[in-house]
């Protein structure tokens, strides 16, 4: 399927990319590490909320796929777990992260435990924040807009390299400035889509009686065991470097805590917009979309007029780009500053970060060639790497979770190896009939079990 785009719609997209580049150039940062990586720890409350809200919502096409197929369960599965753990992060971690002198998670682990553990932790963090899923979504979106005149990989590569350019120029300051623009666009685009969908089909009452029982079911027809898995996956919040980076960059601990609670409020409102947009997509387009992941773009193409259509697609780009540039920056920073600097001690850390950003983009492009599935990328990365990182990261700030230094290194390696082995067994064993599940168990759980055992054996006792 191809979008019916006019030159005016395309001009809006072109203007969006030009404005991003201009913002980045205008906010070109100094070569101070704290300025380049954390915007000088001076991020105000509005900027903090804008960058956190937009960055944590990058998987917008996956959200559309879910709401189109399973309706209001989007809130329970893709919303509530992340609201909960963001609130817990705000209460227990945000202020402590802001007061910590470390600029990154690996540096904080090295300071708390030992240098070897800190350097090792850079590798799973680098992979956890791979920009690959967002590069893939942008490629699919531009392929839809262009009618498939070129492979999606070409579009994805061009957008990824564009992101490398503008965040390498401006550092974290460029990410903050562009996220302020992008959070405005994301809300504007979906408000417009919902208004036109209501005009096309009818009010929410009419919609509610037109969708299926599954769409009205809070569980979406899924088992509670499956839903529970998403609560465990939401533990990603605690080890996600973008949360730590933004808390560390806030102008004060109070700003970090308050900003996270307010961000949850914005996510709840935006989830309302995206959830009902997905329901309208089902009602208007019918239930037979070959690519449910394209529910929002197809709905917008069908019901929005010239100009507003282009604006909505700019909003989709903004949502994805806000996460792409953030993850690209953090993964590059982690590879360059926290890992490679050990082997190139005489090189400027900011230069290593810029090299890491470029390498991260290339690896992201390679990953989508090998494994072109957004949902699977999220599932695999979270299941394999969160169990080994969870307790070492929590232990930096919360005494009850603190491990003895020699157990941190073991936890990162062993928990990751166990979850990865379980994942491989689930995909390769002939008797496995449940995708990634081996013996009917999600690969996340064995890794987490090993982490808990290591914590019981190797936790730092209270004195």
Image: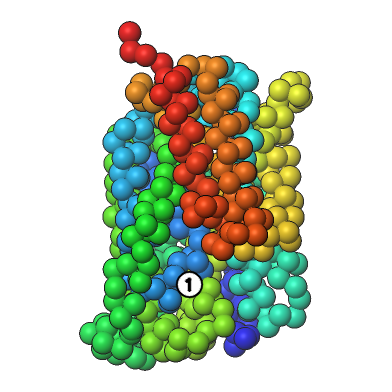
Please tell me how many numbered marks the rendered image carries: 1
Asked whether residue 365 appears in the rendered view, the answer is no
Q: Residue furthest top?
A: 463
Residue shown at 71% from the left, 34% from the top: 351
Q: Residue furthest left?
A: 205
Query: For the C terminus, which image quadrant?
Result: top left
Query: For the N terminus, which image quadrant?
Result: bottom right
Determine which quarter of the picture holds residue 321. bottom right
Residue labelled with disc 1: 65
Q: Secondary structure at mark 1?
A: helix
Residue shown at 42% from the left, 82% from the top: 281
Is 408 rendered above or below residue 129?
Answer: above
Residue shown at 61% from the left, 76% from the top: 11
| Residue 341 image point, x, y percent | 70, 26
Q: Is residue 204 left or right of residue 332?
A: left
Q: Is residue 124 left or right of residue 254?
A: right
Is 370 rendered above or below residue 155?
Answer: above
The residue lying toward the viewer, choosing from 89 and 442, is 442
| Residue 91 image point, x, y percent | 29, 36
The residue lying toward the viewer, choosing from 400 and 79, is 400
Asked whether residue 261 appears in the rendered view, the answer is yes
Is 6 rendered above or below residue 110?
Answer: below
| Residue 416 image point, x, y percent | 58, 37
Which color scheme does this rendered protein use? rainbow
The crowding category of the residue bearing disc 1, from other C-alpha atoms within 10 Å (few below 14, some 14 to 19, many at least 20), is many
Residue shown at 46% from the left, 44% from the top: 445
| Residue 451 image point, x, y percent | 47, 32
Determine which quarter of the picture holds residue 74. bottom left
The residue lying toward the viewer, choosing from 388 and 127, is 388
């Amino acid at each position: 399927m191809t979008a019916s785009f006019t030159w005016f719609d395309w001009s809006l997209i072109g203007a969006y990319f030009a404005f991003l580049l201009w913002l980045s150039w205008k906010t070109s940062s100094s070569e101070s590490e704290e300025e380049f990586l954390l915007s000088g720890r001076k991020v105000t409350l509005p900027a903090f909320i804008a960058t956190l809200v937009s960055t944590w919502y990058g998987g917008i096409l996956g959200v559309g796929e879910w709401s189109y197929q399973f309706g209001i369960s989007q809130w329970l599965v893709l919303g509530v777990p992340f609201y909960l753990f963001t609130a817990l992060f705000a209460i227990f971690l945000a202020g402590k992260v802001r007061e910590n002198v470390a600029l990154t998670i690996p540096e904080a682990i090295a300071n708390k435990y030992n240098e070897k553990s800190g350097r090792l932790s850079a590798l799973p963090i680098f992979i956890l924040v791979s920009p690959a899923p967002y590069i893939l979504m942008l490629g699919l979106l531009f392929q839809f807009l262009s009618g498939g005149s070129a492979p999606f990989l070409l579009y994805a590569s061009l957008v990824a390299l564009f992101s490398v350019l503008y965040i390498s120029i401006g550092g974290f300051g460029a990410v903050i400035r562009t996220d302020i623009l992008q959070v405005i666009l994301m809300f504007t685009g979906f408000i417009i889509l919902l208004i036109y969908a209501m005009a096309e089909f009818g009010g929410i009452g009419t919609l509610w009686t037109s969708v299926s029982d599954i769409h009205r079911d809070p569980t979406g027809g899924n088992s509670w065991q499956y839903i529970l898995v998403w609560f465990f996956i939401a533990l990603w919040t605690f080890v996600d470097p973008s949360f730590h980076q933004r808390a560390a960059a806030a102008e004060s601990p109070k700003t970090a805590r308050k900003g996270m609670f307010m961000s949850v409020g914005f996510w709840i409102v935006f989830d309302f917009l995206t959830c009902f947009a997905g329901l309208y997509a089902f009602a208007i387009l019918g239930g037979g979309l070959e690519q449910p992941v394209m529910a929002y773009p197809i709905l917008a193409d069908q019901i929005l007029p010239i100009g507003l259509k282009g604006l909505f697609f700019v909003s989709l780009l903004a949502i994805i780009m806000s996460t792409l540039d953030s993850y690209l920056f953090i993964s590059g920073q982690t590879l360059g500053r926290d890992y490679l600097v050990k082997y190139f001690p005489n090189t400027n850390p900011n230069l290593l970060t810029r090299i890491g950003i470029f390498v991260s983009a290339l690896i992201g492009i390679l990953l989508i060639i090998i494994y072109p599935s957004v949902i699977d990328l999220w599932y695999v990365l979270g299941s394999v790497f969160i169990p080994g990182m969870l307790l070492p990261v929590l232990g930096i700030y919360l005494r009850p979770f603190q491990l003895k230094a020699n157990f941190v290194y073991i936890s990162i390696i062993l928990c990751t190896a166990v979850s990865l082995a379980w994942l491989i067994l689930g995909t390769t064993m002939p008797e496995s009939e449940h995708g990634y599940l081996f013996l009917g168990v999600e690969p996340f759980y064995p890794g987490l079990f090993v982490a808990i055992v290591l914590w019981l054996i190797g936790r730092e006792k209270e004195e």
